[in-house]
Image: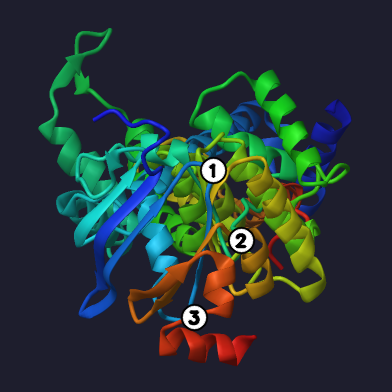
Amino acid sequence: MEAFYEWARVLYETTGINLPFIYDSYDRGRMIDGFFMTVKLSVICLFFSVIIGIIGAWLQNSPLKWTRRIVNGYIQLFRNTPPLVQLYFFYFAISTLLPKVTNEYGGQEPILGGFTWAVISLSFFAGAYNVEIFRSGIEAVPDSTIEAAEALGFTRLHIYKDITLPLAFRVVLPALNNNLVNLVKTTTLAYAIAVPEMLYEANQIWSDNVNVTEMMIFMLLTYFVLVGILVWGMNKWERALKIPGFGA
Amino acid sequence: MTWSDDQPMVSIKDLHKSFGALEVLKGVSMDVMKGEVICIIGPSGSGKSTLIRCINALNDIQQGSILVEGREVNDHKLDKLELRKKVGMVFQQYNLFPHKTALENIMMAPLLVLKQEKAEVEKLARQLIKKVRLEGKEDNYPGELSGGQQQRVAIARSLAMNPDVMLFDEVTAALDPETVNEVLSAIKELAQDGMTCMLVTHEMAFAREIADHIYFTDRGVIVEHGPPDTFFDDAKDPRTIEFLGQIL
């Protein structure tokens, strides 16, 4: 490891290619923190956005007219506005309406921090798409299959949980895959509300070192690998869920 | 409102059913006693399937009465779960759950709906697999089975709920000719065991062999009914005679 750090230092001294996040322990720490912040933000948002998608698609078929309207209103609102505007809306507009708490130094601070708002905002953003994705899968499940479950006395919840959702899931995985890839990329917007994720930390480093070119190349490659891992995992999962004789 | 064996197990009186402006059933009445096997035959669109789908409340009813073991089906306070525990149904398109193996298809309803012990349910399911002669296919998915095999799984799945009456909705209509017999013999054994059966069928020879009573429907009414020998050899109504003339 030390040799690698040293190599980066020599690289800088000999060629001018500056990669301080390798040779400089402070910058390295920032970059690693940023990386894990991005992973944490992605994983939490992936989880909640899928939960929102599943619950939303269930509520979309509610017998209650107003429940359906609220779900559809939510989808329209979050699909038809830019995610950065949503993030600012939560962080600057909603946050100021909430009560403040006193921090350990005796100062006043918002009850929810930037990270929490990023999770809420991005989960709702991706969740809106997920509702529609799950809906398309649910609609692909034949009515006759549902009818067979009804004839066996299944409750609405059991039908959804044990029949509709497992079948719909297999249909929507490619589309879900797409949206989750988008979500991971969209976590970079959290930069705008100073969540110290990877792009934010990269910006800190290039401000100190004036090495924007190197940092941007590094960012591009890192996100490429990160999203690649997600896609690889999703494809593997898709194959694992494949049922003999079902689907194409 | 106590029901006993000497009263009809299924009693239909003046049943009317419309889909929008189209009246499909225009006053149908019939009684089915415990252990009886009845066949409903008739041209396409005469309301046969609609009729038996009303019995387990898959279709709602506009007017008239259906009593299953003395309990009214045409009642908005109807406990559909209780009804469906008593009434089993097998469909034309089998409608198995494609993401579950043959054995799991059979086990699902007793586990989820009746909340029975898993070990007990599995024992029962294996017995039923044997009963419909599908030993060795327990772990196959529906997509890996032929139509006739799938339909026998569907019969076993319905029997796992231990119903008092079985409804068969054109269960051989989608099958290859060479697999029709394996399904028919499964039904025949069931009838011989004393199961109350109501079948919609186009298999005239089978109906004649198995049925205690035959109903002929045309344009939403029962035109003629009687024991098989009388019905097939000595039909009175010109519409029955014409229909039998076309298909026999």
The residue sitting at 68% across, 72% down in the picture is: B205
Q: Write down the residue under mark 2.
A: A174
Question: Does the residue at mark 1 contact the one at mark 2 (Cβ under 8 Å)?
Answer: no
Task: Tell me the chain of label 1.
Answer: B
Question: Does the residue at mark 2 contact the one at mark 3 (Cβ under 8 Å)?
Answer: no
Packing grade of label 2 (10 A; few <14, some 14-19, many >=20) is some
Residue A47: which numbered mark, if any? Answer: none
Report helix, strand or loop for mark 1.
Answer: loop
Q: Amino acid at mark 3?
A: Ala
| Front of the two marks 3 and 1 | 3
Q: Marks 1/2: CA distance?
A: 51 Å
Question: Does the residue at mark 3 contact the one at mark 1 (Cβ under 8 Å)?
Answer: no
Closest to the observer, A187 or B135: B135
Q: Position of residue B127 (x, y in %)?
A: 76, 32
Q: Quadrant location of residue B184? A: bottom right
Q: Marks 2/3: CA distance?
A: 59 Å
Q: Position of residue B172 (x, y in %)?
A: 66, 67
Image-based side of B26 in relation to A184, left or right: left
Q: Marks 3/1: CA distance?
A: 25 Å
| Front of the two marks 1 and 2 | 1
Report helix, strand or loop for mark 3.
Answer: loop
Q: Amino acid at mark 1?
A: Gly
Q: Quadrant location of residue A19? A: top right
Q: Amino acid at mark 2?
A: Pro
Packing grade of label 1 (10 A; few <14, some 14-19, many >=20) is some
Q: Write down the residue under mark 3.
A: B235
Task: Respond whether the residues carrying marks 3 and 1 are from the same subunit.
Answer: yes
The residue sitting at 22% across, 75% down in the picture is: B20
